Amino acid sequence: MAEFLDDGACEIVMNAMNKHCSLSEAITAYCCATVSHLAWSSVEMREFLGELGCCEIIVCCMAFHIGDPKVSEYGSGAVVNLSHENIENSYRLAAAGAIEIMAQLGNFGFNLRNSQSSIVASNTCLALAQMAEALNANKLLECGACELVLNLLKVHRKVDRVVESAVLALCAVASVSTKLRCILGDIDCCEVIVKILKRYDYIPTVTFKACETILHLSVSPGNIHKLIKAHAIDVMMVAFESRMIDTSVGCEICLGTFLNFCKYSTEEDIDKITYKLINMSISDLIRSMKSSNNMSKRCTELGNELLVILGVISPDDLLAEEKENDEAELHLKSSSTTDPSEANRVGDTFSGTAHATSHLSSIMYQLRRTSQELLGADISRLLNVHIDSHEIVENTPRENYNIYGHSAVKPAPAVERDQSVRPAAVNGHHNQNRNNQGPPMSNFHDKENNRKLLKAYDSRMQAPMRDDDDDDES
């Protein structure tokens, strides 16, 4: 490659394009293919070609031979590779009129009789995605980029390459301006993107970019009702649970979308959104996300804000939880500076408690989902257990549940009991919970009393239980 550049090969290609671009379609096509391969090779090569004036020459060549299949294929590929991760070349191409030329060139993608139509359609979407900047918003509006990309997606909906490129373009265009988002909502982009997310969930790029597109579209209040009507919440919850929850960026996208639904929706839709999110166990997913060590601070903030809006947790409880976490971190730091052995002990205890909390939260979430599938939604309320790093306090009887299946009364704090004497109030709690079909009250620190309560509850529910000796041995 070094000898190739030293011999002035790039300058020779530029001179050939300047001399023959208006005369020969074959020479123009192969020169565009050469530029495309050179720009694909490295970042430095893209910068060098941009400084030579390659961006302007490519746009001129495509304008001369707008209907030629080879020039359309190789020219659009050259535009994609020149603008890939190079903002300067993107500005050069946009200033030379590449957006308008690509809008005209993209019409070749509707020529299904030609085998290169899908390639041209994919390159057109990728080129528009990489040139979708705030400075080019008016050009994207005037050339009809929104309608072109959406129609190419509909025509080539069975081609994975075109679907992936079109979703990237829709995501980029929707992030530019409010006018473009409104236009996308008017041409049924909300319904189309939800269907694409549901159908192509096996392609990671399509899943992430489709969710991000819904995030941008939900910023406009006029699009929220269309997204709700298209069942966007149900589809995004499936994507959040299956794929998006594994990464910090995915959690930020999904939680940001749900927050936009709650903030910008009308009074008629807010009750439906709140009921649907709580009924689909969004609180369990957020708690599972917060227990992970890979999540960013922004994810935790978005999750807490969503829980407060939904009414799952009060602002006072949230402040108390944050204060408790800050004190634990401060104690851990102070221990590390004073006594290394003490720091290791505290760190092991803290990490072990966090691991146990995450494990228990995951188990309760799976039990609740399984019970909803097998026995209905009502039995899942029996498994609604509050878990934190210090104690396990089960929620109140069923009459204190609100319509969403969550406790409307804050549970009483755990109280230390004498191990040798069983309190008389236990029978009262037990009988009360039996009448309400709820689990017995328990105390995390009173193991012997807990075993008796659980044994009585399990016998009432006709479920097998291990002996006390097995529990002591374990």
Image (cartoon, grey):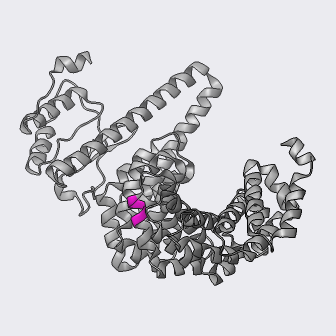
**Quarter of the view holding residue 337:** top right
Residue 172 is situated, as x and y percent measured from the top left of the image, at 60, 67
- Between 52 and 144, the one lying in front of the other is 52
* Res. 101 visible in picture: yes
Residue at (40%, 76%) from the top-left corner?
Answer: 226
Left or right: residue 94 compared with residue 149: right
Determine whether 470 is above or below 195 in the image.
above
Dominant secondary structure (helix, strand or loop) of the stretch shown in magenta = helix
Direction bottom: furthest residue: 142
Q: The C terminus is located in which quarter? A: top left
Q: Residue at x 16, y 54 (%)?
A: 376
The N terminus, quarter of image:
top right
Residue 35 belongs to the span the image colors magenta:
no
Is 68 positioned to the left or the right of 381 in the image? right
Q: Is residue 66 above or below residue 393?
A: below
Judged from this view, the residue extending furthest toward the right is: 7
Q: Which residues are magenta?
A: 195-199
